Amino acid sequence: MRIELSMRASCLAIVASMGAISTGVQAQGTATLAPTTTVASDAPVEAAADQGGGGLEDITVTAQRRPEKVQSIPVAVSAFNAQTIRALNLEDAISVSKYVPSMISQHNAGLATANSYFLRGLGNTQSAATFDPPVGTYVDDIYVARQNANNYAFFDTERVEVLRGPQGTLFGRNTTGGAVNIIMRKPSEDFGGKFEVTAGSYDRVTAKASIDVPLSEKILTKLSAFYVTDDGFVKNITTGEHLNGDKSYGVRGDVRLKPTESLTIDLSGEYTKNTGTYFGVRVLPVASSKFRTSTTPVFYEAAMNMRQVSCKGDPVTILLGTQDGLCLNTDNYATSAHINWDTDAGSLEAIVGYRKQNQGYINNYSSSTVNKFAGFVLADKIRNNQHSGELKWSSSAFDDKLKYVAGIFYLKENNELKTATFSGGTTSYVLARTASNGVTYGADIHFDQSVETAAAYAQADWEFLPDLTLTAGARYTYETKRIDFFQSDRFFSPAFTSNPTGAAGYSSAQVEAAGIPLKQEQNRVTPRVALTYKVTPGTIVYASATNGFKSGGWNGTNSVPFQVLPFRPERTWSYETGFKSDLFNRKLRLNGTAYLAVTKDLQVTSGIIVPPSTVISQLARNAGKLRTYGFEFETVFAPTKQFNVFVNGSIGKGKYLSTVLTPGVPLVSQITTDTIPLRVPTFQLATGATYKVPVAALGGNVGLTAAYRHNSSYAVAALNTAFAPREDFVDLNLTYDNDDGEWGAAFGVTNLTKQETITANFISLFPGDPRRFTGRLWFNF
């Protein structure tokens, strides 16, 4: 869900005001904008005071599936605790990415609930179930399989961990690029609650509330909820409506049972609803040197003669009945159980979860086309459900010189998609058609896909010499995928298809007749090895080699059966060396990671001709081999409890080492070794400073934060038809915190200089966020 409190700057500001920035580690009494550092808290003064007027504290993470200090592990991880999330105003999963080195993220074109994460050059922009994301999303250690609803809302979150690079051993599901792990807050032993409300630009209003009600020492409960409304920042100049708004809400209940001192059972259930949209802007028929596009975007305007309606129901029926659309409706349901049994020999955990999603949307991607019937319109109905289970054992031996974790994992997933494409009409919507060998196919595709995965994993850390630790682990994965196609149960004019009844689409038999298998199986072992040396109590150096893979799939949304081509898994080896250090009585944190990643059978969408067709189609396929390398750094200096400075960022390069070319397709429509890889900025930087002082006359602390973020230009289209420009963002935030911690307020501005950027190029150019002003008020009891 997309719940973005429009206070990016205030996020940075509060973060800085809270403490510090650092890679993979978060400062507990200092604010941080760095990926691996966590900004600490709404009470930075007390935390810092305990350390002589300044200093940073560690955050505990589970990046290796057991609690550890983030500064002590050989993993490139950026961790954000609850205080940092609040301080930075991180309201959803996508908002975290701007603080993580080597990470670029946007919403999928036309789908506000779907995040397209790119880490170290690995990511994907498709949300269809037949194409898996290489950056996995986890909620309470439960894998969220579908990218079309991975923008998880932070309405009562304890911690977020972003792991950079392949996580093939412990977070092994499709993580060639990395993983985003969201851990929700558990019920408290004390009665209490909190409420927060914000209001800002584009009539955006958000509200969040949470209350803890312990029923006894052994039964703890918590109820949380959120609500968001936003009119949207894109004006449709044809209809006068505003687009790219948001209306969302959700509720979550948690129960913690503690029948014995050694047994804890956490149960949760939640429901969220999102109707937010994300459309492109209109363009002028003039080439743009700034965006390296053949047209020039007009910020922030669209020109579609289509009005917004509700997407509740069948999107095709709604589109044809109302002749309008521009809508999204997503209902998400989730339940989970986490059972932890601590014994003298170790800890046994059982984690089970169920997630269900119903989604429908009508997207007009032709933002400059006034005639709505002539545009490119998708009307999709999607159903996904998954259930998973994991059993994990962790323990230690030889006076903690040997620590290990092992487990088994199972996932069953079922996906249904009905997608209809309309284009080229004049006075009515015309179903898109493709003719081949005398057969005409109407673009109304229906498929069911099932995925079944089982895995076993183990990893051990052995301190075989004083201060020198060897980490070794591996994961075995078996996976089966099946897909079935059906002719449409929605009927159109027979002129649209070769079927006299007017049924569109095609069947599984037609796909198999084209020689395309409807089943895929994978057997794979993904190992990891690392060496860590503790130079001093506050400094480690490490080196690692990690393997990961991402599942294969099909081009499941194509309008003709012989283009439902399968593609192979994507495989990555990543080699890293780095250091983590806390210096000068923990007032200075320096973290750095150098990496080299080589990915084979990279899954990318590019031009291809599939016989018997003679027309170029843009299909997902294995494009070749990609190499990325770079250096990531996070630094924070907190000399006093009132002042801190942070600097963090990355230097990165990407290069296609080899590609697969298709005869007959022009090079401009193919991935070649000269193509610039997607979303790999050469340089990223986030820096800022916070000054926070107690003001006795006001009975609290007043803080001011100024932050600056920079990205060098990077490709946002696989065939290099569009680039984000050099991006420079300035954020300011003024905060007040009551001494008793009972209430506080903030006023901030994000994107102060009105930086204009684009995030994608799919028929239209999709805009980044504009400048926003936001006020915030919160209460605790």
Image (cartoon, rainbow, N blue to C red):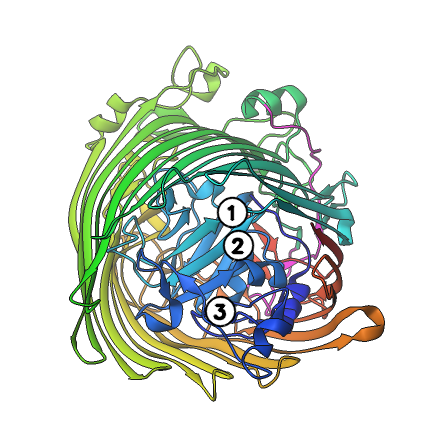
Identified by mark 1, the residue type is: Asn
Label 2 vs label 3: CA separation? 19 Å
Q: Which residue is mark 2?
A: 94
| Callout in the foreground (2, 3) | 3
Q: In which image quadrant can residue 59 be found?
A: bottom left
Q: Name above or below for residue 488 compared with residue 593.
A: above
Label 3 with label 1: CB-CB less than 8 Å: no
Measured as percent of width and height from the top left, residue 5 is found at: 66, 53
Q: Are marks 2 and 1 in contact (CB under 8 Å)?
A: yes
Mark carried by residue 151 = 1
Dot 3 falls on a residue whose secondary structure is: loop
> Which badge, 2 or 3, comes first in the chain's sequence?
3
Which residue is located at x 64 percent, y 56 percent?
Answer: 285
What residue sits right under mark 3 in the picture?
26
- Place of residue 421 in the rendered image (x, y in percent of width and height, measured from the top left): 50, 31
Q: Residues within 10 Å of mark 3 (few under 14, many from 20)?
A: many
Q: Please, what is the three-letter code of the amino acid marked with disc 2?
A: Ile
Q: Secondary structure at mark 1?
A: loop
Q: Principal SS element in the magenta part?
A: loop
Q: Which quadrant of the view contains residue 434?
A: top left
Mark with earlier residue (3, 1): 3
Measured along the vertical axis of the image, is residue 345 above or below residue 500? Answer: below
The circle drawn on residue 649 is none
For badge 3, the amino acid type reads Gln
